[in-house]
Image (cartoon, rainbow, N blue to C red):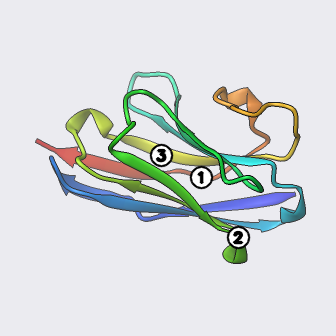
Amino acid sequence: QVQLVETGGGLVQTGGSLRLSCAASGRTFSMYAMGWFRQAPGKEREFVAGIRWSAGITFYADSVKERFTISKDNTKNTMYLQMNSLKPEDTAVYSCALRSRGGKPYARGEFDYDYWGQGTQVTVSS
């Protein structure tokens, strides 16, 4: 089993920045990829960004490209999401996820991931 814990959410004004962290523990030897998803009230969960753990290859949703940056620290088994130029439409619960299976280089669907964190609220005020 893998446990994921997100930190770093909060309230920020439009144009501000936040950095989310996701720390993985447990069976972390089988980390193929990790990703960030978000879910706004009344909306479906959507993919935000992903990173292939060994290769460090990153991929993003079009809505956050040029504003968000996903990164990782292998020594800490921790993934980050640096969010800049935040907009009110970025308001959501952000969750991190881990894929332990190989075979999908750019996993963007929630069913592509095996483990989930509890989520952290990000609120952007206008």
Mark 2 vs 3, N-terminal side = 2
The residue that mark 2 highlights is 74
Mark 3 falls on what kind of element? strand
Rounded to the nearest angstrom, the CA distance separating label 2 from label 3 is 21 Å
Q: Residue at x 44, y 51 (%)?
A: 69
Tell me residue 29's x, y (percent): 89, 63
Instruction: Give the class, few, some or many, for how many residues have Cα within 10 Å of label 1's Cα (few <14, many ≥20).
Output: some
From what the image shows, is residue 5 above or below residue 14? below
Q: Nearer the viewer, residue 114 or 101?
A: 101
Q: Nearer the viewer, residue 42 or 86?
A: 86
Going by the numbered disc 1, the residue's amino acid type is Gln
Q: Residue 82 falls in which quadrant of the image? A: bottom left
Q: Quadrant of residue 54?
A: bottom right
Query: Does residue 73 appear left or right of residue 91 in this picture?
Result: right
Q: Farthest top residue?
A: 43
Location of mark 1 (residue): 118
Q: Which amino acid type is marked by label 3?
A: Tyr
Q: Nearer the viewer, residue 49 or 122?
A: 49
Q: Which residue is mark 3?
A: 94
Residue 13, x across and y down, in percent:
15, 52
Between disc 2 and disc 1, the foreground one is: 2
Which marked residue is nearer to the observer: mark 1 or mark 3?
A: 3
Residue drawn 16% across the image and 49% down it: 15
Element under disc 1? loop
Q: Is residue 53 left or right of residue 86?
A: right
Q: Nearer the viewer, mark 2 or mark 3?
A: 2
Q: Residue furthest left?
A: 126
Q: Earlier in the sequence, mark 1 or mark 3?
A: 3
Q: Are marks 1 and 3 in contact (CB under 8 Å)?
A: no
Mark seen at residue 56: none
Please report the residue visible at 81 percent of the width from the left and 54 percent of the height from the top: 31
